[in-house]
Image: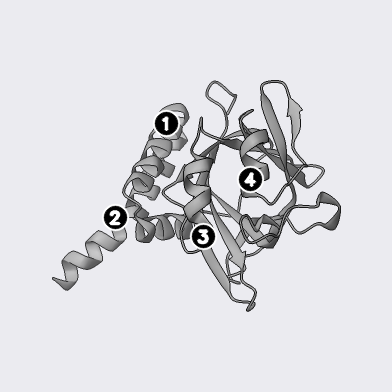
Amino acid sequence: MTAQLQQQTSAPRAMTDELKDRAATHPVSARAQAWDYLAGLGARDDHAALAEVFAAGVAPEGPDGKMEGLIVGKLFGIPEARLANPLMRIDPTWRGKTFDLAGGVGWNRLSPIARFVMPVVAGGYLGLRRVGAEMEGFDFAHALAPSWIEPDKVVRGLDYAVPEYRNPGVRTFPIGRTRDEIVEIIPGVYLGRALLRMNSGAIRLIAYFALREPIGSPL
């Protein structure tokens, strides 16, 4: 039984290694396979497997530019998720993130319905901007840094607490108290986790998400 449990535990890391090997020779299909694998883990809400995949990820040189996003599984660990879960999945509300790598800044992209949804979820947040067919907002600064919960692991940390961005720290959507951490799974595909600093000072993992370079983008 112990050997069987160890084999099950190591499966996500083995899959990650296989995807990395495949990416070296078949980068396009490897990106599609990695994305589908992460989506499947999310559909099962397999937090243990996601934690192992994250651990197998490496400190990313990117991302840079517009990234497609996917919420991987449910938001969890905070009462606010009861409201945010259904609203964030409309249309879907969250489309992804855009990074300015040289400038160390970025922002989230959302569907047009976000202008109606986010004031409800985010305590009247008015920082969204209409850009083409999407809304942009919830800006962040980003840089390579030690993880909040694993100091020996370097991640790309996304800081939403920059005062001039005026991100909401309200109970219903406390993004001003969150930090996203991103690792590279294979080139062009990233796994992220959202961490929330509680009022007590404790850090709680509240969500996983994936990012990828848009289909058809150069490798």
Marks 1 and 2, Cα distance to the nearest angstrom?
A: 19 Å
Secondary element at image label 4:
helix
In the image, farthest residue toward the bottom = 200
Q: Position of residue 11 (x, y in %)?
A: 29, 55
Residue 32, labelled with which disc?
1
Marks 1 and 3, Cα distance to the nearest angstrom?
A: 26 Å
Judged by depth in the image, the label closer to the viewer, 3 or 4, is: 4
Q: Residue at x 38, y 58 (%)?
A: 47
Confirm or deny contact between disc 4 and disc 2 (CB under 8 A): no
* Sequence-earlier tag: 4 or 2: 2
In the rendered image, which residue does mark 4 sit on? 120
In the image, farthest residue toward the right = 164
Neighbourhood count class around disc 3 (C-alpha, 10 Å): few under 14, some 14–19, many 20 upward: some
Judged by depth in the image, the label closer to the viewer, 1 or 3, is: 3
- Does 159 appear above or below 215? below
- Does 190 appear above or below 50? above
Secondary element at image label 3:
strand
In the rendered image, which residue does mark 3 sit on? 206
Occupied quadrant, residue 110? top right
Q: Identity of the amino acid at label 3?
A: Ile
* Sequence-earlier tag: 4 or 1: 1
Residue 11, labelled with which disc?
2
Q: Residue at x 23, y 61 (%)?
A: 7
* Sequence-earlier tag: 1 or 3: 1
Residue 88, labelled with which disc?
none
Q: Is residue 162 left or right of residue 96?
A: right
Q: Identity of the amino acid at label 1?
A: Ala
Marks 3 and 2, Cα distance to the nearest angstrom?
A: 23 Å
* Sequence-earlier tag: 1 or 2: 2
- Does 115 appear above or below 11? above
Res 92 visible: yes
